[in-house]
C-alpha cells in the first residue's frame, strides 16, 4: 500500500497550495495534486499575469502623458511579444516560488489528473487515483501517477471559462482569458462580452494599447456587483478613454469571417445592431471543475455547478471537502485561500467560523481601479438598513492632485442605527491598495467613531478614506 | 527594550486564567527558566516561566486576580542595562494598563478627549521632527474605546466597538455574554445571539418576574464568568440573614464545574437506566488475581486491583461491544469511536477531575489500576495535564466507598453517558425460587438521548452487567 496522507488536496491553485501549507503547519502529512501548474489559474492565467499586462499598459499610458509631468518621451511605442514575455516571466517566477514553499513545508506534490475513488470510513482511509497528465511536464521532485490514500480529501479544482452556446471560444477569433493573456499581435478592434472584473480588465488593457474596444453587458450596469454610483463613474471614464459600452444588451449571434467576427447585438430597446471586430473575448463568467473527479459516484451534493459546502469546507460526504472557485462565489483567489485555511483548521478541531462573505474585498485593476467591500448602498437599503452615506472625491485630496489623478470617489455606507460600516466602494488611482484599511476596520467591528479617531498619514490617498467617513456624519473637512 | 510577560495560554482552549501567585517580586533578577508565577486555569495549576533574562521591573496584574485574559500583559521584565524603575510596557499597548479600567465614557467625543502632550515632541530634545516618535501608544484611547469594567462582574470585558454599541442600544449586559471572537472577544453576533435568546440579565429589583426567562439562556449566552444566570447574587443574599454566611469566591474549577454541568443538564436530554450487578464472581476473581501479583523491587505487591478497575475495564469493553453507544453528539452529527475512552471521576478537595483512561477496552486490569493510581495522585496535586482530562465517551463515578447505594450522575460534556456506581453490599435476593445472599452493586447509566436511545442504552448497560457478573471475560 502506498503512503497514507492525513490530507490530500486536488488542485494546487491559490486555494489548494495555501491549504496544503497550512495543513503541513498543523502537523498533517499532506499532499497536493495538480495536472497542469502550481499556483492554479491565479498565478498562471488569472490574477497575476493580468496585473503584469496592466502594469505595462499603465506605464505606456504615463509615457504618452509624460508632458503632463514636465517630462518628454518621444516615439513611445511597445513590443507586444516583450509585454507578453514579461507577464509570462512573472507567472513563471511565482509558480516556481510555490514549488519552493511546498517543498519547504514538506508537502508532497503529485502530478497528474486526480479523481476520488472513495472517502475515509472508520479506520479505512479514502483513495484517490492519479492518472498521468499530458498537459504539462511535472515539476522536479513530484510524485507520479498511482493510487494514493488519505484520511481527508479536499477538492480545490477551481473553475474554467463559461461558454455560451453558439459563441464557443475557438482560440482564434473567439478568445477566452487564456488567449487574451498571450496575444501575438495587438488586435485593432475588440469586442468584449461580459463586464465583470475579467472583461473590464482586458477591455482596459487593450484600449490603452490602442484597440477599438466595445463592451457588451447583459445587465443594465457594467461591473454588476459594484455599487451603482461607482460603476457609473467608471463607465464615464471608460467612455472618455474611447471604450464603447452597451449595457442591457445581448450578443445573439456571432459570425466568423476570415480574420474578424461580426456580432449581432440586441439592445434593451429591442433594436439590433452589428459590430465587427478582429477578436471577441468571451468573459461571461466561469464554471466549477466538478466533472470526472468522482463526485457524482460519491453522491456529493452539487448545486448549479458548484459543490455545496457548510461554510467550513465540509461537503455532505464526511471526509470530503471543497474550497475555492469550485465551492462557489465569490470566485476570488483570497477567498479560496481563506476558505482552505478554515477547512483544515476545522479538520484539526480548532475554533473556526464560516467566512463572512460580506467582508471579502473585491478589486478590479482597470484604469481607473475599482475596489469594494461589503454592501452597496442599494443593497443595504434593500435589506432594510437606514444608511448614512459618505462620499469624498479625489479632487479634494492633495496627494491625488500631486499624482495627477484628480478623478475618483471614496464612498462609505454606514448603518445609521449602530454606526456599523456596512460597505466601502472606491474608484480611482491605487484604490485596490487602499480598500484593505476598511476591511480591517470591518473585521474589528469598528464603528464610525473608531474610524474618525484614527489618524491617517498626510499626504496620502488614504486620507480620503477618513474624509469619506467624516462626510457620512457631516464632519468632512476638505469639500 | 523591556520585555513584556503576557498571560500564557496553557491549553488551546484556554481563554483566561487566575493569577494565583507571584513567585518573584518586583526588583528580583530573573533568568530564563525561572518560575515567575503560578496560573490557575479551569482545572489545573501551572507555572509561568521566564524566557528572558533581566529584572522583574513591574508586576502589572497582582496575585489573586481572577479571569485574566490570555495574552494580557501581566508583568514587565527590564532587560540587561535597562533601569527597572523606569521601564514601561513595550509596544502594542492599549491593552493592559490597569489604570484604564474606569468605565468608558461613550458620548460621541470626536475631539473632546484631552490631548496628550505634544505628540510630535521627542521626550529628550523637545524639537519638532519629521520622524515618527517611538513610544508605546497610550494605554487608554481617546473616546469610547477604553477597556470597560463591568460593574459588579469583577473582570474586564473585551468586546468590539460595534458589540458595545449594540449592547448599549439593546440593553444587553456584556458581562452576561460569551465572546466568540479572537481570544474570546465579544463581537456583534454574540450580542445579537444573547439578545435573541433572552440571555440578558434582568436588572436586580424586577428580576423575580423575569426569572424564568433568564434561567434558561442558550449555552452561548452563558455569563462569561461561569455559572449560567440563575438567581442573581443580590437575590440569593436576600434570602438569608446578613451575618449567617461566609462568601467563598469561586476558583476556576468551581466555575468550570458549574458551567459545564449546567450546560450538560440543559443541552443533553438525560435518561437513566438502573441495574443490579452481582459481584460474587468478581470478588473471587479479584482475590485470586491480587494474591497472584508478583512483588516489585520494594517487596510490595506489583498490583492491587480495586473493584473500580474492573468497572472501568467492563465499561471499556461494553462500549466496543455496543459500537453505536461508543459515540458522542457533535452539533449536526455523531462522532463514533473505535477505541473506548473511559473517564473516571476523582474527587479532590474543592471539586473533582475526570481523567480519561484511553483504550480502556484493550488495557489489562493491572495497567488500568496503575494508571488510575497515578491519575488520582496527580489529580489531588492538581498536576494533571489538560489533555489527560479531555475527551472520553463515558465516565465512571463511584460513590460506593461513601456507602451510597444508588444515585444518578450528570453527563460530563461532550461525553454521551456516565455510570453512577453504588456500594457493593450483601443483599437477599430470590435465586431459583429460594432466598439467597449475594453481593450486589447497583449501577445507573445516565444517557444522552441525542446519541443513545433507551434500547441502545439498555444494550450497553446489559453488556456491562454481563462482564461484571462473568468477569473472566475481561481477562481474555
Ligand atoms: C483573467 C483572470 C483574472 C483574475 N484576476 C483575479 C484577481 O485579480 N484577484 C482575484 O482574487 N482573483 C482573480 N481571478 C480569480 C482567481 O484566479 C480564482 O478565484 C482562483 O484562481 C481560484 O483558486 P482555486 O484554488 O479555487 O482554483 P484554481 O486557481 O483554478 O486552481 C485549480 C487547480 O486545480 C487543478 N486541477 C483541476 N482539476 C484537477 C484534477 N482533476 N486533477 C489535478 N488537478 C486538477 C488545476 O490544474 C488548477 O491548477 C482571476 C481569474 C481570471 C481568469
Image (cartoon, coloured by chain):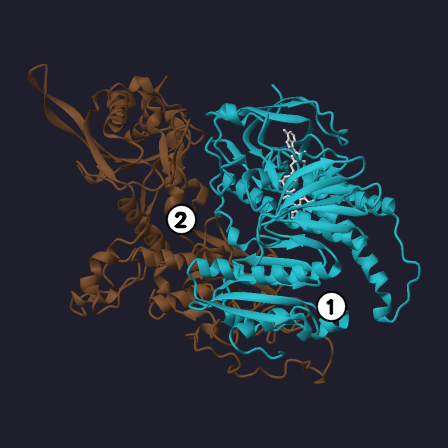
Chain colours: A cyan, B brown
Does residue A347 sit above or below B289 in this rendering?
below
Discs 2 and 1 share one subunit: no
User: Residue B382 got which mark?
Assistant: 2
Alpha carbon separation for disc pair 2 and 1:
66 Å
User: Residue A405 got which mark?
Assistant: 1
User: Residue B307 got which mark?
Assistant: none
Identify the chain of the residue marked 1, using the numbered disc in the image: A
- Coordinates of residue B394 in the picture (x, y in percent): 33, 34
Q: Which residue does the image show at 55% across and 74% down from the upper left? A: A471
- Count of marks placed on residues: 2
- Occupied quadrant, residue A208: bottom right
Binning the other alpha carbons within 10 Å of mark 2 as few (below 14), some (14 to 19) or many (20 upward) gives some
Q: Which residue does the image show at 67% across and 75% down from the upper left? A: A396
Identify the chain of the residue marked 2, using the numbered disc in the image: B
Q: Nearer the viewer, residue A147 or B238?
A: A147
Q: Identify the secondary structure beneath mark 1.
A: loop
Q: Nearer the viewer, residue A166 or B281?
A: A166
- Occupied quadrant, residue A282: top right
* Residue B350 seen in this snapshot: no
Q: Identify the secondary structure beneath mark 2.
A: loop
Q: Quadrant of the C terminus of chain B?
A: top left
Q: Nearer the viewer, residue A396 or B112?
A: A396
Looking at the image, the residue that sits furthest to the front is A271
Amino acid at each position: 500500500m502506498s503512503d497514507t496522507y492525513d490530507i490530500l488536496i486536488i488542485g494546487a491553485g491559490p486555494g489548494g497550495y495555501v491549504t496544503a501549507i497550512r495543513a503541513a503547519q498543523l502537523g498533517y502529512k499532506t499532499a497536493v495534486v495538480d495536472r497542469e501548474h502550481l499556483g492554479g489559474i491565479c498565478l498562471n492565467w488569472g490574477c497575476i499575469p493580468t496585473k503584469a499586462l496592466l502594469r505595462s499598459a499603465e506605464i505606456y499610458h504615463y509615457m504618452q502623458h509624460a508632458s503632463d509631468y514636465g517630462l518628454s518621451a518621444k516615439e513611445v511605442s511597445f513590443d507586444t511579444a516583450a509585454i507578453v514575455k514579461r507577464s509570462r516571466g512573472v507567472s513563471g517566477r511565482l509558480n516556481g516560488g510555490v514549488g519552493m514553499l511546498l517543498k519547504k513545508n514538506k508537502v508532497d506534490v503529485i502530478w497528474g489528473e486526480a479523481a476520488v475513488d472513495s472517502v475515509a470510513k472508520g479506520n479505512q482511509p479514502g483513495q484517490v487515483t492519479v492518472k498521468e497528465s499530458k498537459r504539462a511536464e511535472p515539476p522536479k521532485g513530484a510524485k507520479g501517477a498511482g493510487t494514493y490514500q488519505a484520511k481527508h480529501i479536499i477538492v480545490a479544482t477551481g473553475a474554467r471559462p463559461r461558454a455560451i452556446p453558439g459563441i464557443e471560444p475557438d482560440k482564434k477569433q473567439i478568445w477566452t482569458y487564456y488567449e487574451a493573456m498571450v496575444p501575438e499581435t495587438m488586435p485593432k478592434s475588440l469586442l468584449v462580452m461580459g463586464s465583470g472584473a475579467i472583461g473590464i480588465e482586458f477591455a482596459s488593457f487593450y484600449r490603452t494599447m490602442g484597440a477599438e474596444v466595445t463592451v457588451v453587458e447583459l445587465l443594465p450596469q457594467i461591473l454588476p456587483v459594484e455599487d451603482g454610483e461607482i460603476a457609473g463613474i467608471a463607465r464615464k471614464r471608460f467612455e472618455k478613454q474611447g471604450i464603447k459600452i452597451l449595457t442591457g444588451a445581448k450578443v445573439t449571434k456571432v459570425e466568423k469571417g476570415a480574420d474578424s467576427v461580426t456580432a449581432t447585438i440586441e439592445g434593451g430597446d429591442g433594436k439590433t445592431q452589428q459590430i465587427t471586430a478582429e477578436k471577441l473575448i468571451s468573459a461571461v463568467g466561469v464554471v466549477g471543475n466538478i466533472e470526472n473527479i468522482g463526485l457524482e459516484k460519491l453522491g456529493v451534493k452539487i448545486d448549479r455547478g458548484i459543490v455545496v459546502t457548510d461554510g467550513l469546507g465540509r461537503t455532505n460526504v464526511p471526509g470530503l471537502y471543497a474550497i475555492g472557485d469550485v465551492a462557489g462565489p465569490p470566485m476570488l483567489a483570497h477567498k479560496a485561500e481563506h476558505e482552505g485555511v478554515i477547512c483544515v483548521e476545522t479538520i484539526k478541531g480548532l475554533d473556526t467560523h464560516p467566512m463572512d462573505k460580506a467582508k471579502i474585498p473585491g478589486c478590479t485593476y482597470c484604469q481607473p481601479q475599482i475596489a469594494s467591500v461589503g454592501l452597496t448602498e442599494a443593497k443595504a437599503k434593500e435589506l432594510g438598513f437606514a444608511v448614512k452615506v459618505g462620499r469624498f472625491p479625489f479632487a479634494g485630496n492633495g496627494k491625488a492632485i500631486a499624482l495627477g489623478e484628480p478623478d475618483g470617489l471614496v464612498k462609505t455606507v454606514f448603518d445609521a442605527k449602530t454606526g456599523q460600516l456596512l460597505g466601502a466602494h472606491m474608484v480611482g488611482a491605487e484604490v485596490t491598495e487602499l480598500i484593505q484599511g476598511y476591511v480591517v476596520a470591518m473585521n474589528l467591528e469598528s464603528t464610525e467613531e473608531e474610524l474618525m479617531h484614527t489618524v491617517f498619514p498626510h499626504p496620502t490617498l488614504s486620507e480620503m478614506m477618513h474624509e469619506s467617513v467624516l462626510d457620512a456624519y457631516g464632519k468632512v473637512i476638505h469639500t | 527594550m523591556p520585555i513584556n510577560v503576557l498571560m500564557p495560554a496553557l491549553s488551546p482552549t484556554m481563554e483566561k486564567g487566575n493569577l494565583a501567585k507571584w513567585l518573584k517580586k518586583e526588583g528580583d533578577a530573573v533568568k530564563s527558566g525561572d518560575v515567575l508565577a503560578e496560573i490557575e486555569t479551569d482545572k489545573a495549576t501551572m507555572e509561568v516561566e521566564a524566557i528572558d533574562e533581566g529584572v522583574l521591573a513591574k508586576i502589572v496584574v497582582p496575585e489573586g486576580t481572577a479571569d485574566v485574559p490570555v495574552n494580557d500583559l501581566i508583568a514587565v521584565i527590564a532587560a540587561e542595562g535597562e533601569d527597572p524603575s523606569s521601564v514601561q510596557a513595550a509596544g502594542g499597548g492599549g491593552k493592559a494598563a490597569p489604570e484604564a479600567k474606569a468605565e468608558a465614557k461613550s458620548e460621541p467625543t470626536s475631539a473632546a478627549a484631552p490631548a496628550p502632550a505634544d505628540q510630535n515632541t521627542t521626550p529628550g530634545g523637545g524639537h519638532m521632527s519629521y520622524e515618527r516618535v517611538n513610544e508605546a501608544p497610550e494605554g487608554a484611547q481617546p473616546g469610547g474605546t477604553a477597556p470597560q469594567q463591568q460593574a459588579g462582574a469583577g473582570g474586564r470585558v473585551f468586546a468590539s466597538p460595534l458589540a458595545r454599541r449594540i449592547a448599549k442600544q439593546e440593553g444587553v449586559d456584556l458581562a452576561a455574554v460569551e465572546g466568540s471572537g479572537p481570544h474570546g472577544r465579544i463581537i456583534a453576533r454574540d450580542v445579537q445571539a444573547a439578545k435573541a435568546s433572552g440571555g440578558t440579565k434582568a436588572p436586580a429589583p424586577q428580576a423575580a418576574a423575569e426569572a424564568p426567562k433568564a434561567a434558561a439562556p442558550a449555552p452561548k449566552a452563558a455569563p462569561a464568568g461561569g455559572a449560567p444566570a440563575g438567581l442573581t447574587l443580590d437575590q440569593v443574599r436576600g434570602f438569608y440573614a446578613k451575618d449567617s454566611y461566609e462568601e467563598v469566591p469561586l476558583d476556576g474549577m468551581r466555575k468550570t464545574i458549574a458551567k459545564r454541568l449546567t450546560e450538560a443538564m440543559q443541552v443533553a436530554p438525560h435518561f437513566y437506566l438502573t441495574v443490579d450487578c452481582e459481584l460474587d464472581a468478581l470478588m473471587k476473581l479479584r482475590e485470586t488475581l491480587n494474591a497472584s501479583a508478583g512483588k516489585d523491587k520494594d517487596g510490595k505487591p506489583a498490583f492491587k486491583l480495586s473493584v473500580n478497575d474492573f468497572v472501568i475495564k467492563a465499561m471499556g469493553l461494553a462500549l466496543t461491544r455496543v459500537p453505536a453507544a461508543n459515540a458522542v453528539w457533535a452539533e449536526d452529527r455523531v462522532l463514533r469511536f473505535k477505541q473506548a475512552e473511559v473517564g473516571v471521576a476523582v474527587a479532590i478537595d474543592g471539586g473533582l477531575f475526570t481523567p480519561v483512561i484511553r483504550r480502556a477496552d484493550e488495557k489489562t486490569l493491572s495497567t488500568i489500576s496503575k494508571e488510575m493510581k497515578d491519575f488520582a495522585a496527580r489529580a489531588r496535586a492538581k498536576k494533571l495535564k489538560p489533555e489527560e482530562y479531555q475527551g472520553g465517551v463515558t465516565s465512571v463515578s463511584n460513590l460506593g466507598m461513601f456507602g451510597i447505594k444508588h444515585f444518578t450522575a450528570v453527563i460530563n460534556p461532550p461525553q454521551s453517558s456516565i455510570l453512577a456506581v453504588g456500594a457493593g453490599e450483601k443483599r437477599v435476593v430470590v435465586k431459583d425460587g429460594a432466598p439467597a445472599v449475594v453481593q450486589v452493586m447497583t449501577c445507573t447509566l445516565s444517557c444522552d438521548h441525542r446519541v443513545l436511545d433507551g434500547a441502545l442504552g439498555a444494550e450497553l448497560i446489559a453488556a456491562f452487567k454481563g462482564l461484571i457478573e462473568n468477569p473472566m471475560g475481561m481477562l481474555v
